[in-house]
Image: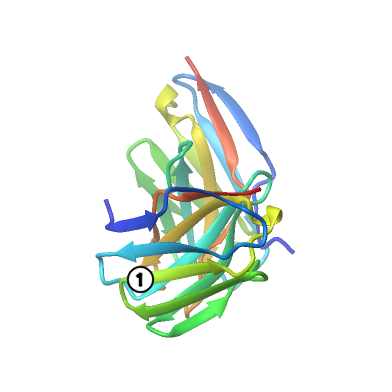
């Protein structure tokens, strides 16, 4: 299994509070991604990183920010959580973009009440 | 606008028979296609992939077919087993920094 750890695995938070999810990898892969999975929507890209301090927005980036200060860590922050951000969040890593697969973490189930 | 489409939300197949999962894409720039399998409460796991220079790739019971002119790919599972019951996601990418784009998934149920 690829060395990807997401933390926390489960979290319940209140509307309006900030939340940070962490993705940690031990594979030294350059590319890291945050997806969310919702019923009827599949996996949608939130933000991604193609190197330390290099990040870009995905399809559903509103209300989220990311940071990558080290190769191994990619943080996803909800500045002020809303109920629409209740979801399962997956981190993924990829060694290079040409003809390679991405490996996923176990996911973080976030509930905003 | 969805670039990768899985139009069947669910599929039910008897054990031992063939399962065929379909995927369509709209962006002709895609040159690499993947299938992932996902069990409840777990992350997606890579299953099989195919490059656009091929039209078929096989790995054990799993075969992926690519029809570039139709912008269509399919995953065949033969024979289907109860342990194959999961959600299957189709994904696509092209060269550069672009991430994988996923379809909405198809839930496969293999009935014993």
A74 to the left or right of A19: left
For residue B2, which quarter of the picture?
bottom right
Q: Quadrant of residue B106?
A: top right
- Observer-nearest residue: B53 or B101? B101
Secondary structure of residue under mark 1? strand
Q: Position of residue B11 (x, y in %)?
A: 61, 30
* View extreme (right): residue: B1
Q: Nearer the viewer, residue A64 or A14?
A: A14
Where does label 1 land, which residue? A73
Residue A103 place in picture, x, y as percent: 37, 57
Residue most toward the top? Answer: B112
Subunit of label 1:
A
Report the quarter where the N terminus of chain B lies: bottom right
Above or below residue B9? Residue B5 is: below
| Relative vertical location of residue A56 with respect to residue B11 in this rendering, above or below | below
Horizontal relation, residue B106 to residue B62: left or right: right
Residue sitting at the far bottom: A53
């Amino acid at each position: 299994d690829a060395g990807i750890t997401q933390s926390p695995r489960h979290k319940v938070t209140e509307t309006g509070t900030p939340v940070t999810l962490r993705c940690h990898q031990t594979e030294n892969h350059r590319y890291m991604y945050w997806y969310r999975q919702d019923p009827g929507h599949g996996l949608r890209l939130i933000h991604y990183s193609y190197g330390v301090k290099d990040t870009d927005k995905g399809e559903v980036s509103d209300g989220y920010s990311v940071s990558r200060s080290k190769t191994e860590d990619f943080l996803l922050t909800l500045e002020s959580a809303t109920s629409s951000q209740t979801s399962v969040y997956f981190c993924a890593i990829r060694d290079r973009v040409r003809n390679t697969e991405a490996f996923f973490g176990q996911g973080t189930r976030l509930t905003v009440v | 606008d969805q670039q990768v489409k899985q139009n069947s939300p669910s599929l039910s197949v008897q054990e031992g028979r063939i399962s065929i999962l379909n995927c369509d894409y709209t962006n002709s720039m895609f040159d690499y296609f993947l299938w992932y399998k996902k069990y409840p409460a777990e992350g997606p796991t890579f299953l099989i992939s195919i490059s656009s220079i091929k039209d078929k790739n096989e790995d054990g019971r799993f075969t992926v077919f690519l029809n570039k002119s139709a912008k269509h790919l399919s995953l065949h599972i033969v024979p289907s087993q109860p342990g194959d019951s999961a959600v299957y996601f189709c994904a696509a990418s092209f060269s550069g920094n672009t991430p994988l784009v996923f379809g909405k998934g198809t839930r496969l149920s293999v009935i014993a």
